Every structure is written in C-alpha cells, then in structure tokens.
Image (spheres, coloured by chain):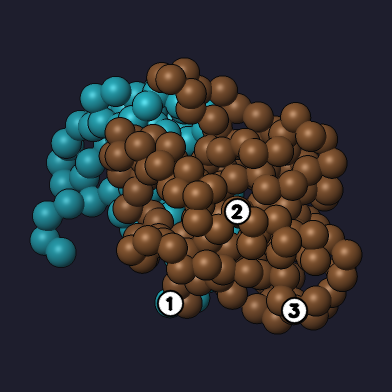
Chain colours: A brown, B cyan
Amino acid sequence: MPLTPETLPRHELNGLPVRVVESDDASREGLEGRVVIETTNTLSVEVRENGESRVVMVPKSGSTFEFAITDDAADLEKGSGTASKLADTQPAAADESSAPADRAGGDAASCRGDDPSRDRHHAAGEGVAYVTVDGLRLLSRPARRTETNGDSPWQ
Amino acid sequence: MDVAAERIERLHDLARAAAADDEHDRARYYVRLARRVAERNRLTLPRTFRRFICDRCDAYLRPGRNARVRLQDGHVVITCDCGAHTRYPYGDQ
Ligand SMILES: [Zn+2]
C-alpha cells in the first residue's frame, strides 16, 4: 500500500515536507520544513531558512499538520539539494492555492473529534497532494502507528 | 507490499541520506526505528539494508568513512568504527 492520504497516519512521517497549519502556540504556526524525528508526542521539524537549518519540536496534540505527498516521496531524500528546494517551494505553493480551505478544514477538524472528513487532501500541482491531519491522530509510538491506526478514522 | 515494508524502505533511504550528511545520530535513529518496525511486523530487514548497518551500535555504515571492508578467505569482514565485526561469505553463491 503506497503512501496515500488514507494511509498517511499509519505511514512513515520522517522525511515528509510538512507545514504547521494550526497550533496552540501561535509562534509555531506556519512553520514549514521536513519531519526529521518523530517521538510519541512530538514531531521535530527541520526548517531551512537562507542556508541555515534549525530543528523545531512541535507537539502533536494541539497542532494541525499539512503534509505534502508526492508520488515518490522517498526519492526526494536522495539528493539533499533537491529536497531543500522542494521543502522551500511546495508549502509556499500551498499557501497561494489552498490555505483558506485548509484553515477551514482545520477548524472543522478541531471541533469534531471523530469526523472521517478530517483528512482533507488537495491535488495541487503535478502529482502533489496536501493532506491535513489533526495531530491527535498521530499520537502513538512511531513504530506502533502502523498497526494501531487503521485506515479507518474510527478507533 | 504493505505499509511496514514501505516504511522500512523509506527509513533506509533516510538513514543513508543522514549518514551521507554526517548526521550519524540521526541515521542511528532511523536504523533503530526500522528495526523496531520490522520486529513488530515480523519482517526481516532487506539484505541490502542489513549489510550496511552495525549490529552493535546501529550506525549506518559507509565503507571508507565509518567502516572498514576487508576481503579474507571466502568471506568479507566489515569493521565498524565502534569495533564490531560483521562477516559474510562471498563467492560460490
Ligand atoms: Zn558499530
């Protein structure tokens, strides 16, 4: 089963381009980068800004994440040059096209805990899908997510 | 291929990329996560992955950088910087 919007909560998050759509801590909102380390309760996002990179730890609970999925997400890792370029460009593209829709989706998701429509995905550009996931759905030990969270949003 | 096998494949790529950037602790984290995912889903890591990780310290091995590769009588010996040896045969297979 490839990495699709449906399988994303069970799949590997490390290495994916991500944007923090919403967070309890306003200073973390809008962070864009790549997931480098996942723990039970946090995602560490590597943010590259004008050649410098820093790693910001974002708690899963209380945040809404937007992941960018390409057909070959794994291939992006091979060249770090292209990876950083993509990390810079992709979420920016999302800002222009789908940000208002995502905000709305995120709001709805945070109100209704168990709604199956929480995973919103937008096909934007060529072969790139943006998936918005409530951080609460990712709360799990990294190695266990594959078994514990089924494709169904129902527990 | 199920999600677990794909995760392992992606973790292999991530570990290789991290080791290439000299981020050895991060590479170790990816290797350990891959091992844990394999363990929980009753899979074996692919041979190409297994041959590039240290059994003792979970480092991702880059021959010439943090691993020594020597050929001996019918087998290869890989020595990690931590001192652990791995041996595997070559030849009539
Ligand atoms: Zn070692």
Q: On the picture, is B90 further left or further right than A5?
A: left
Q: In terms of secondary structure, where does tag 1 sit? A: loop
In the image, B20: left or right of A30? left
Label 1 CB, ligand 1: below 8 Å?
Answer: no
Q: Which residue is mark 2?
A: A99
Between the C-alphas of marks 2 and 3, the distance is 20 Å
Of the residues under marks 2 and 3, which one precedes in the sequence? 2
User: What residue is rendered at 23% in x and 51% in y?
Assistant: B89
Q: Give the class, few, some or many, for how many residues have Cα within 10 Å of label 1's Cα (few <14, many ≥20).
A: few
On the question of residue B61 being in view, the answer is: no
Q: Furthest-left residue in view? A: B92
Q: Is residue B8 above or below residue A84?
A: below
Kindly identify which residue carries mark 1. B1
What is the chain identity of the residue bearing mark 1?
A: B
Question: What separation in Å lies between label 1 and label 3 (alpha carbons)?
Answer: 25 Å
**Where B14 sits versus B47, above or below?**
above
- The Cα–Cα distance between marks 2 and 1, rounded to whole angstroms, is 34 Å
In this picture, residue A35 sits left or right of residue A147: left
Residue B17 at x, y = what percent?
37, 38
Q: At which x and y percent is residue B15?
A: 43, 41
Near-viewer residue (A32 or A44)? A32
Location of residue B54 in the rendering, given as x and y in whole percent from the top left corner: 44, 38
* Residue drawn at x 17%, y 52% as measured from the top left: B90
Q: Mark 2: which amino acid? A: Ala
Q: Give the chain letter at badge 3.
A: A
Q: What amino acid is found at the position of numbered circle 1 in the picture? A: Met
Q: Amino acid at mark 3?
A: Pro
